[in-house]
Image (cartoon, rainbow, N blue to C red):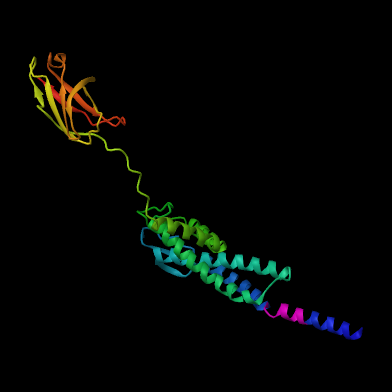
Amino acid sequence: MVAKLGMAMSEDTLEVTKASDDYWIGVALFVFSLIAALLLVLAWPVPIKDNLTEVTTGLGNGNAQVRFLVLAMVAGAFGSLIASARNYAAFRGTNRYAASWNWWYLMSPVVGMGLGALLFVILQTGLFSISLPNNGSPQNANPAGFVAIAMLGGMFSRQAVGKLGDAFNTFLTPQEKPAATASQPVIDKIDPAEKNIGDGNLEIVINGKNFDSNPTVKVGGNERKIASKTNVKLTVTLDAADLAKAASLPVIVSNSNQSSSKPVNLVVK
C-alpha cells in the first residue's frame, strides 16, 4: 500500500516536473509581447510638415515607406505573440501542453513579421485597396489601418496564409475561354453602294461573311427577297418603292439564330 502510494506520488511529481519544464516559453512570450508593444509605440509614424517623403517616429526620422514597413512587421509579430500567448495559457491551464510545440511558439513572431511585411506590400501594390493620399505615398496615411491588418494577419496566420494561397491560385489560374458563339453576319460592302431614283435595275449584291443557309435581308426596315445566296454573297431584289425618292436605306442581314449584322446604308439619290 505504501509502495503504491509512493509510486503515485512519484508519478505526480514527475508530471508536475514535466509540466514546469517549459515555463520559460510563457515567460518568453510575455517578455516578447511587452517588447513588441513598446516597439509598436516607438515605430508609430507621425507626418513631418512640408515633407512628403519622411516621417518621424520614436526611433528617429526616416523614409515613410520604410517606417511603415517596419510598423507593419512589428504589428504582425505582436499579433502572432498575442495569439501564441493565448494558446499557451489555454493549453497550460487544461494540462494539455506538449513540449513538441515549443518551436511553434518561438517561430510564431517570425511568421507574424513576414505576414505583416507581405500584407503591407500587397496593400502598396494595390491588389487590395486602402486609402493612400499623396499619389499612393503612405506619408500622411493613417497608420492604424496598416497596423490593424498586420496584427489580424499575425493573430490569424493560418487563415491569412490560406486566403493568400487562394488568391494566388486564382491569380495564376488561366481564365476559361468563353464558349464559342455563333458567328455574327458581317456586311463588307454593297454593290452598288448608290442607286438612282427610279432605277429599273432593282438588284444589289451584298458582300460579307458569316451568312448562314437561311438569312433574311431588310432594306429600310422592310424584308426583301434574296435571289441567290452563299456564305459570303447575297443577291437581293429591291422593291420599286425603295428607289422612289432620295433616301439612305439601312441594309441589315440576319441569320436564322437571330444574330444580325451592323447596318450598312444604301444611298438613293
Q: Quadrant of the N terminus?
A: bottom right
- Residue 49 is left or right of residue 85, and the answer is left
Q: Quadrant of residue 98?
A: bottom right
In the rendered image of this protein, does residue 146 appear above or below residue 218?
below
Q: Quadrant of the C terminus?
A: top left
Tell me residue 196's x, y (percent): 7, 19
Of residue 20 and residue 241, the one placed in the foreground of this image is: 241
Start and end of the magenta stretch?
14-22
Of residue 178 and residue 238, the one placed in the foreground of this image is: 238
In the rendered image of this protein, does residue 74 appear above or below residue 184?
below
Total of numbered circles in the picture? 0
Q: Residue at x 21, y 28 (%)?
A: 263
Determine if residue 71 is in view: no
Q: Magenta stretch mostly in which secondary structure?
A: helix
Of residue 173 and residue 120, the one placed in the foreground of this image is: 173
Determine if residue 109 is in view: yes
- Residue 34 is left or right of residue 221, and the answer is right
Tell me residue 109's x, y (percent): 54, 70
Q: Quadrant of residue 236?
A: top left
Tell me residue 65's x, y (percent): 39, 63
Query: From this viewpoint, which residue is outermost toward the right?
Result: 1
Q: Quadrant of residue 50?
A: bottom left
- Residue 182 is left or right of residue 58, and the answer is left
Tell me residue 210's x, y (percent): 23, 36
